[in-house]
Image (spheres, rainbow, N blue to C red):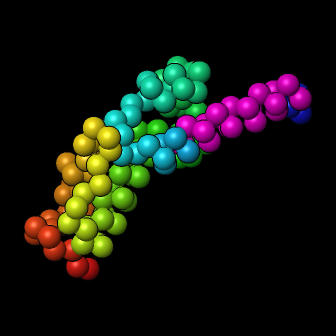
Amino acid sequence: MASRPAEAQHLHDLARLRRVRDRIDREYAQPLDVEALARGAHMSAGHLSREFRLAYGESPYGYLMTRRVERGMALLRRGDRQEHHGSEGYAPWRPILIGASGQVARSGEPLRR
């Protein structure tokens, strides 16, 4: 049977991982890297990656890329002509959408299924 301190530590670690996931969900359009996320969670990048994968089934980087692709695909489906940029004008979904979707939209046209 697990001890109370071990259970408490596990819950604390899950809360830190949830905060990392929430930060990715909020700041996906900003330049993020695993090292910065790990520093914010007060753990090493390797430990964050391992624990995040155990908790959510994919690495923090994989989760970030999934959020970016989903957002980019939503913008393309809606037919938004204006891209929404972060404060530095960073458009994270642009280079990965073609590979992720296998589709290319003509200028200003939404993707059709």
Q: How many marks?
A: 0
- Main structural element of the magenta stretch: helix, strand or loop? helix
Residue 46, visible in the rendered structure: no
**The C terminus lies in which quarter of the figure?**
bottom left
Q: Identify which residue is drawn at 62% across, 41% down.
A: 18
* Residue 92 shown left or right of residue 24 in the figure: left
Q: Quadrant of residue 106?
A: bottom left
79 or 87, nearer to the observer:
87
Is residue 24 visible to us here?
yes
Query: Horizontal and vertical percent for residue 58?
Result: 48, 44
Q: Does 46 sit left or right of 8 as displayed?
A: left
Residue appearing at x 58%, y 33% in the figure: 51
Q: Is residue 50 above or below residue 80?
A: above
Residue 27 belongs to magenta span: no
At x 29%, y 55%, the residue is 84
* Horizontal arrangement in the rendering, residue 1 relative to residue 50 (left or right): right
In this rendered view, identify the residue nearer to me: 3 or 11: 11
Whether the magenta-drawn stretch holds residue 12 is answered as: yes
Front-lying residue, 31 or 81:
81
Q: Which stretch appears magenta?
A: 4-21
Query: Residue 62 placed where, x, y %?
Result: 41, 43
User: Residue 48 appears at what percent x and percent y?
Assistant: 54, 29
The residue furthest left is 106
